[in-house]
Image (cartoon, grey):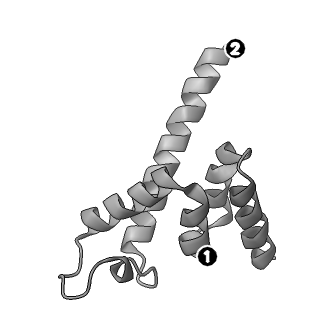
């Protein structure tokens, strides 16, 4: 029998979180109804997919609650689970509850 140690569970959970974060960012960057261009100054060309992903990553890293407020409506229930890691953040919990209620 194979039993996972606490450290191997932590590594497995971290790798799932990183993969989920990347899939969330790439999914939003390529989503046709997710406007990131409004965050870009007028007159500039439309950002590339990678530039959109980088912008989203910066917003997520700086403030997960603002990220959820702006882009949470485009996320699936499974993607919302990613934000459970910020459970000690009141604003993140507020938006998670609001978004999950809207899915019912």
Screen quadrant of the N terminus: top right
User: Does 41 appear above or below 52?
Assistant: below
Residue at 75% across / 54% down in the picture? 90
Total numbered labels: 2
Pointer 2 and pointer 1: residues touching (CB < 8 Å)? no
Location of residue 93 (image quadrant): bottom right
Label ID, residue 3: 2
User: Does 70 appear above or below 94?
Assistant: below
Residue at 54% across / 56% down in the picture? 63
Label 2 secondary element: loop
Q: Position of residue 43 (x, y in %)?
A: 19, 88
Location of residue 76 (image quadrant): bottom right
Q: Position of residue 104 (x, y in %)?
A: 82, 76
- Left or right: where 78 falls relative to 24: right
Q: Where is residue 97 in the image (x, y as percent from the top left)?
A: 79, 65
- Between residues 75 and 44, which one lies in front from this camera angle? 44
Neighbours of disc 2 within 10 Å: few (<14), some (14-19), many (20+): few
Q: Where is residue 26 in the image (x, y as percent from the top left)?
A: 39, 62
- Left or right: where 34 falls relative to 52: right
Label ID, residue 73: 1
Location of residue 102 (image quadrant): bottom right
- Left or right: where 47 falls relative to 21: left
- Between residues 37 and 74, which one lies in front from this camera angle? 37
């Amino acid at each position: 029998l194979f039993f996972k140690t606490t450290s191997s569970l932590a590594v497995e959970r971290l790798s799932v979180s990183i993969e989920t974060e990347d899939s969330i960012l790439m999914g939003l960057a390529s989503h046709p109804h997710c406007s990131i261009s409004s965050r870009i100054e007028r007159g500039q060309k439309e950002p590339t997919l990678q530039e959109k992903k980088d912008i989203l990553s910066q917003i997520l890293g700086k403030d997960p609650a603002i990220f959820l407020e702006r882009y949470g409506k485009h996320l699936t229930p499974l993607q919302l689970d990613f934000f459970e890691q910020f459970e000690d953040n009141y604003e993140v919990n507020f938006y998670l509850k609001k978004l999950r209620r809207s899915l019912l």
